[in-house]
Amino acid sequence: MARTDNDTWDLASSVGATATMVAAARAMATNAEDPVIDDPFAAPLVRAVGMDFFTKLVDEDFTTDGLDEEAATGLHRFANGMAARTRFFDDFFLSAARSGIRQAVILAAGLDSRAYRLPWPAGTVVFEIDQPQVVEFKAKTLAGLGATPTTDLRPVSIDLRFDWPTALTEAGFDATKPTAWIAEGLLGYLPPDAQDRLLDQITALSAPGSRLGVEGVPATETNDEESIRAKMKDFTDRWRAHGLDIDLNELIFLGDRADVTTYLEGHAWQTTGISSNDLLIQTGLPPVEDEAHAASVLYISAQR
């Protein structure tokens, strides 16, 4: 279903299903022979959502037997990419904690389990922002598993298109204290103006010493958009035949958008970045040589 201005979703539909897809990839990466991440909550959360395709992927005995070579290769690449991305944002939070930051915000948290699995220092408060259905489902599922947060977790049930800064403040957020923010796998689902607005809102709430970890999505030239849309259609058609019905063309916003690094540096942030391929190599995983657009995604750490 195509996006609309006020659309909502659960974890088995629309943008929510992509959060389940990413959690499935984290479960696959956790089950790998030599894992670079450990997310023990990914698989049970995916099973609880109940999408058959993803439930099969998180089985410890899952193999790519029965898939054609292109599909099998693509699945491994996706799992590797999500493993490297997860490590990046895990390490970002751990580094911020070592620097003394004791307030963290996870934007569009989805099935993120960092509040349950990272070793947060005493006194840390973690805020998770997402749609009410998503927040409620995850909290209820993890409670049913007997899981408890490793920090003071404060969910904030609100869509990022609404007045989330006020909701965050009402949950106890203190804008006078340094904050570690992450926007993981988020910007591609925002129109360009919404991306700018989100970065402005984060900046307005960030005291000196705050940090931001974000995945920068490249702008799309008009003459490239058609080929990218065609690739996403091929992806959709290929995986629909295997039982996955997610149409990325309906969910992702392409077109011209601000370069995140340039935008942040113009708003009093200092930035460093690493490409997705360099991140794979740094994490000990094989780079992707034949997907130029994916390789141009930049993982950015910024500090005020």
Image (cartoon, rainbow, N blue to C red):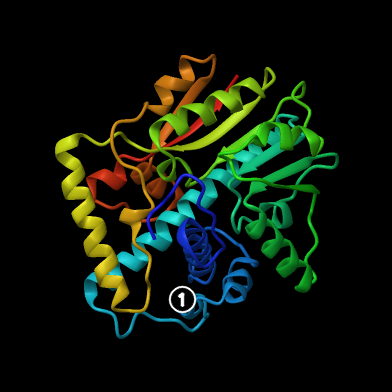
Q: Secondary structure at mark 1?
A: helix
The image quadrant that residue 238 belongs to is: bottom left
Picture coordinates of residue 77, whole percent (x, y): 34, 61
Picture coordinates of residue 52, whole percent (x, y): 48, 80
Q: Amino acid at mark 1?
A: Leu
Q: Quadrant of the C terminus?
A: top right
The residue sitting at the left extreme is 223
Say which residue label 1 marks: 57
Q: Residue at x 48, y 44 (%)?
A: 186
Left or right: 4 in relation to 181:
left
Q: How many marks?
A: 1
Picture coordinates of residue 221, whole percent (x, y): 21, 34
Picture coordinates of residue 225, whole percent (x, y): 21, 43
Left or right: 114 in relation to 230:
right
Q: Residue at x 45, y 50 (%)?
A: 283
282 vs 238, nearest the viewer = 238
The residue sitting at the right extreme is 123
Q: Is residue 84 above or below residue 197?
A: below
Q: Residue at x 68, y 17 (%)?
A: 208
Q: Is residue 93 above or below residue 2?
A: above
Neighbour tally class for label 1: few under 14, some 14-19, many 20 plus, Cα within 10 Å: many
Left or right: 148 in relation to 76:
right
